Amino acid sequence: MALLTILFCIILLVLLVSWAKVNPFLAFLIVSIAAGLFLGIPINKVTAAVQKGIGDILGQLVIIIVLGAMLGKLVAVSGAAQKIAEMLVKAFGEKYIQWALVAAGFIIGIPLFYGIGFVLMVPLIFSVVYKYKLPAVYIGLPMLASLSVTHGFLPPHPSPTALITMFHASMPTTFIYGFIIAVPAIILAGPVFASTLKKIPSEPLATFRAEEIPQDKLPGAFNSFFAALLPVLLLMITAAFPYLHIHNAHILKLAAFIGDPPIVMLIALIWGTYALGIKQGNTLGKLAVSYSDAIKDIALILLIIGGSGAFKEVLTVSGVSGQIASALQQSLNLQPLILGWLIAAIIRVSLGSATVAGLTAAGIVAPLVLSGHVNPNLMVLSIGAGSLAFSHVNDSGFWLFKEYFNLSIKDTFRSWSVMESLVSVIGLAGVLVLNQFV
């Protein structure tokens, strides 16, 4: 009966978001309360469980996600992203321009949230397409594959960051594993797959060609790369620190403090504020406006994450979460990493939102992870890969790609949807390979 109740609640969530067009946070709130009542949680404790779930997950994530959004906005509005793309195109040359854009998408995609990255990078893609008279989908899809992979696999993006917290995984370790998996996923789903799409007709709309920032207004190459990649560098140093065999207690405490993800993001933002803001002649007041805009950009994402935390807490308090994980594993007889991927993929296809898919799946499989039956870092990546599966008409990314590139529905399925599915399947394969060695 409990499993049927949860199935009903997930279907209700799908219908509320995709059919009734209810705000995802409200949908999570309604479904969480309904699930609590149906699963037998005392009526006077249902709201307490919902509040605790929201507070627990947001209390650990707000700093990281908000600071990450601010840094991403700064990288965008300062011209650092444009500078990075231009430098890479120049370094790779016209012959390998597609690979330059892939590298640019990956570097810029780490600090930028997906929606911001898409809107920012597409005009750069179109600039290259018009300048060198190249097929738009062939050139553009690999860069967008990079953005998609960073969105699904790598912190500080919302879904993987939330999953790391829920599973008590290590952010530096997850980032390194994610990087290892991301490279082949991007190559195969990006340049290799795009080579089959050269003949897709695409005339990008002139409306979406943004004006480039003048060269004399752009930050320097070093400042652009360093500011965008500083969180990555700090996380990698933190991951490598235990292998340096340093035993001084004060140094170890300082390293642990600096390597704490909120501190990593704060250091990166402070540096970025100086290097990409003040040094470029901007005032703190002007930067504050950009940072406020960044918070507005991710406000709904934070609420969705909070809602998913409420749903997870209700499942935990009712005791049904462990039953679901055990029943699914026994009935499907699947390895836990494959199970996590499959649940995320089913919810992704149903709802369209990668973030909602990842967080909902995490709430269901959390008992398997927390009981020690699976590597938590790899489960983050497995669910992240599943959350990217088969983007179609219920996903805003599908329509963004279609409209920006001025494609037919058929060609959007043939290019965008297949690319997202390849990223998902290759990501799962990478996770399973890594699981044999770690």
Image (spheres, rainbow, N blue to C red):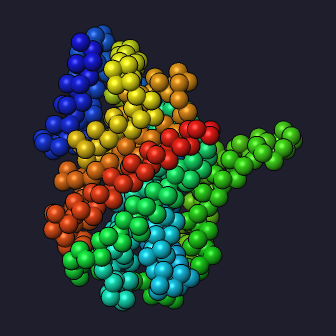
Q: Is residue 190 left or right of residue 375?
A: left
Q: Which residue is drawn at 81% across and 48% down?
A: 244
Q: Residue at x 27, y 14 (%)?
A: 2
Task: Indicate the position of residue 188 as horizontal and vertical percent values.
Answer: 43, 61
Task: Indicate the position of residue 375 as horizontal and vertical percent values.
Answer: 55, 33
Q: Quadrant of residue 400?
A: bottom left
Asked whether 117 or 52 is in front, the reply is 117
Q: In this view, does 93 lie to the left or right of 365?
A: right
Q: In this view, does 115 lie to the left or right of 204?
A: right
Q: Is residue 160 left or right of residue 24?
A: right
Q: Could you tell me which quadrant the N terminus lies in? A: top left
Q: Could you tell me which quadrant the C terminus lies in? A: top right
Residue furthest to the left: 20
In the image, residue 240 sits, relative to residue 189, either above or below, namely above
Task: Determine if residue 44 is in view.
Answer: no
Q: Residue at x 45, y 29 (%)?
A: 336
Task: Indicate the position of residue 267 as horizontal and vertical percent values.
Answer: 63, 56
Q: Quadrant of residue 311?
A: top left
Task: Indicate the position of residue 24 as horizontal and vertical percent values.
Answer: 25, 41
Asked whether 421 or 248 is in front, the reply is 421
Task: Determine if residue 199 is in view.
Answer: yes
In the image, residue 98 sits, relative to residue 55, either above or below, namely below
